[in-house]
Image (cartoon, rainbow, N blue to C red):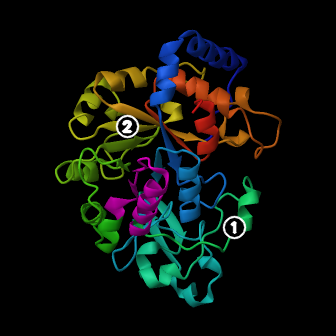
Amino acid sequence: MTFPILSVRVKAAFLSIVISAFTAGTAFAAGADDMLVIAHRGASGERPEHTLAAYERAIDQGADYIEPDLVATKDLVLVARHENELSDTTDVAGRAEFEDRERSKTIDGRLVTGWFAEDFTLEELRSLRAKERLPGLRSANTRFDGLYPVPTFGEIVQLVRAKEAETGRGIGIYPELKHPDFLLQDSGIDMVDLLVAALRKADLDDADDMVFVQCFEAGPLQRLNTMIDVPLVLLVTPGSGPADAPDITYEDMLAPSGLVDLSGYVDAIGADFRLLFDTDGEPTGLVEAAHEAGLQVHAWTLRKENAYLPPALRVGSAEGATGDVRGMMDILSASGIDGVFTDDPALVVSALGR
């Protein structure tokens, strides 16, 4: 996400939040210690997203959880891609053998043209190679284009267990189900059943396992709540609503009565920053309201580039230059959130003083 262009008042508002954080003393420090660092698609600020290399780098940098977005192949294998459309993150568009697979599909109300994971078998998909999704901002990452295959969810679990054995610490997995309602209607692929089976196979379906499952849709989370015991997370963003419930908005779901309803089937909300702060940089009160309802708040997404930071925290004028990540972390820590999604776990871990 990008922040809106904010007025000069915002700089003072943001600074007041930071000052409040530092004057809070030990309470601020405790919050920093407890905050979960969730590696958004791995260390995707340094490696092409959703590759084993990105996940391993995030783990080595101290992330508490790695976050794979999950789609499914034609032969019902869960794989990690940001979207089921593949051309932004793989070399599929340049592969002559798959030229005839290009399609147009309406996904959650939006017409998308490209190549879709659900039209490929795992063997076919594994012949593709990952590429950087944001080459204009992250040109250094393009040197890794063509090196890495698309990983399966099973391989991600294997990596986590190998790194746990290597480091002696627990490492969490935070999968997101992508477009489950669309995939069920379009291709008959039940993402809920596939994920439950995968978690049970890996013995990762209990309440004490280091797993959160997230989704922008309500129905799949309600089903998951009856099938597995791991914490569940509804993702929310302004001006929209669940694709499987078009008559309700996320703002409706975040009203006091809506939060009470949510607490019946999820354990946390994954909130776009814009729902946590208004256009003047002041907290909206959502964190406190969610906590009152017994829900954690995990905020998304902290990226180091100026393009993704508020104007007051940008350094220089280049969109791809590194801004003041530490300043943004001070603000987020002071807001009382329980976790933060980030493309740059090393910078966030450092900002938290770990």
Q: Which percent across, then down, holds residue 274?
A: 53, 32
Q: Residue at x 58, y 24 (%)?
A: 331
Q: Residue at x 44, y 29 (%)?
A: 34
Position of the N terminus, as image quadrant, is top right
Q: Residue 51: which quarter of the image?
A: bottom right
Question: Is residue 107 in sight in this rendering?
Answer: no
326 relative position to 248: left or right: right
Extreme-bottom residue of the structure: 97
Extreme-left residue of the structure: 226
Q: Which percent across, then down, holds residue 57?
A: 59, 55
Q: Is residue 168 magenta?
A: yes
Q: Residue at x 29, y 56 (%)?
A: 204
Q: Is residue 347 above or below residue 203?
A: above
Task: Give the numbered dot on residue 144.
Answer: 1
Front residue (pair 171, 45):
171
Q: Nearer the viewer, mark 2 or mark 1?
A: 1
230 relative position to 70: left or right: left
Q: Which percent across, then down, holds residue 59?
A: 53, 51
Q: Residue 240: which quarter of the image?
A: top left
Q: Which percent across, then down, holds residue 283?
A: 51, 20
Q: Identify the amino acid type marked 1.
A: Phe
Find the magenta span and give its range.
154-182
Q: Residue at x 53, y 79 (%)?
A: 102
Task: Give the numbered dot on residue 269.
Answer: 2
Extreme-top residue of the structure: 23
Q: Is residue 35 magenta?
A: no
Crowding near the residue tagged with mark 1, few <14, some 14–19, many ≥20 C-alpha atoms within 10 Å: some
Pick whichever of labels 2 and 1 is earlier in the sequence: 1
Task: Give the numbered dot on residue 38.
Answer: none
Front residue (pair 33, 231):
33
Q: Give the secondary structure at mark 1.
A: helix
Question: Is residue 327 in sight in this rendering?
Answer: yes
